[in-house]
Image (cartoon, helix red, strand yellow):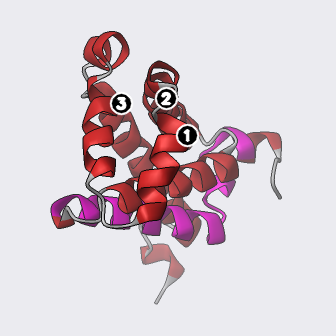
Amino acid sequence: MDTDTIWLTGAQWLAVLRIGLGLWWLESWRHKDRKSWFETGSGIAWAADIAARHRWNAVRSGFDTVVAPRPRVMAYVVVYAELALGLGLILGFLTPVALAGGLLLNLLYFALMIHDWAEQGQNSMMALISVVGLFGMSWQTWSVDGALGWFG
């Protein structure tokens, strides 16, 4: 293929993928009813109900140990982690950290909602994009990290 006919380079396509994942995280943050999450703990209460009925004891006990004792703090952690991931990936700022953090959050969501296969498609694709972005070094193009020469 003649390089003059290539619309975007491979590095640019990886940046598009990274930015798209960031937009996905930003939308996850945007659509949350933050008042409900922070004041009533609705998101954590919903997750507690799922965890209580989960078929894996590790999920139940992990939730009871880490999340249940501090529902308000965990509501803020979840909501603002999604915002930070979205902004970090869109801007390409601390991109490897954002990609690894997003992968971890998707794996936690995946484990919690293992019974809900409709949700698993989204979590699986977001996790896959995170892995591709990490190994493809998607921060090298169109990013703050690339402009500053961070992360080689």
**Residue at figure coordinates x 33%, y 9% from the top left:** 39
Indicate the amino acid at tag 3.
Answer: Trp
Nearer-the-camera pick, 86 or 124: 124
**Residue at figure coordinates x 42%, y 76% from the top left:** 5
Q: Position of residue 112 (x, y in %)?
A: 36, 55
Q: Quadrant of the C terminus?
A: bottom right
- 10 Å crowding of disc 2: few (<14), some (14-19), many (20+): some
Nearer-the-camera pick, 5 or 110: 110
**Residue at figure coordinates x 26%, y 24% from the top left:** 42
Q: Please give the range of residues in magenta.
A: 118-145
Nearer-the-camera pick, 95 or 12: 95
Indicate the amino acid at tag 1.
Answer: Val
Residue mark closest to the camera, 3 vs 2: 2
Mark 3 touches mark 2? (CB < 8 Å): no
Residue, far left: 118
Residue 74 numbered tag: 2
- 10 Å crowding of disc 1: few (<14), some (14-19), many (20+): few
Q: Position of residue 63 (x, y in %)?
A: 46, 45
Q: Is residue 130 magenta?
A: yes
- 10 Å crowding of disc 3: few (<14), some (14-19), many (20+): many
**Residue at figure coordinates x 55%, y 68% from the top left:** 131
Q: For the stretch drawn in magenta, what is the main secondary structure? A: helix
Q: Position of residue 127 (x, y in %)?
A: 45, 63
Mark 2 touches mark 1? (CB < 8 Å): yes
Earlier-in-chain disc, 3 versus 2 = 3
Is residue 85 positioned above or below 133 on the image? above
Residue pointed to by mark 1: 66
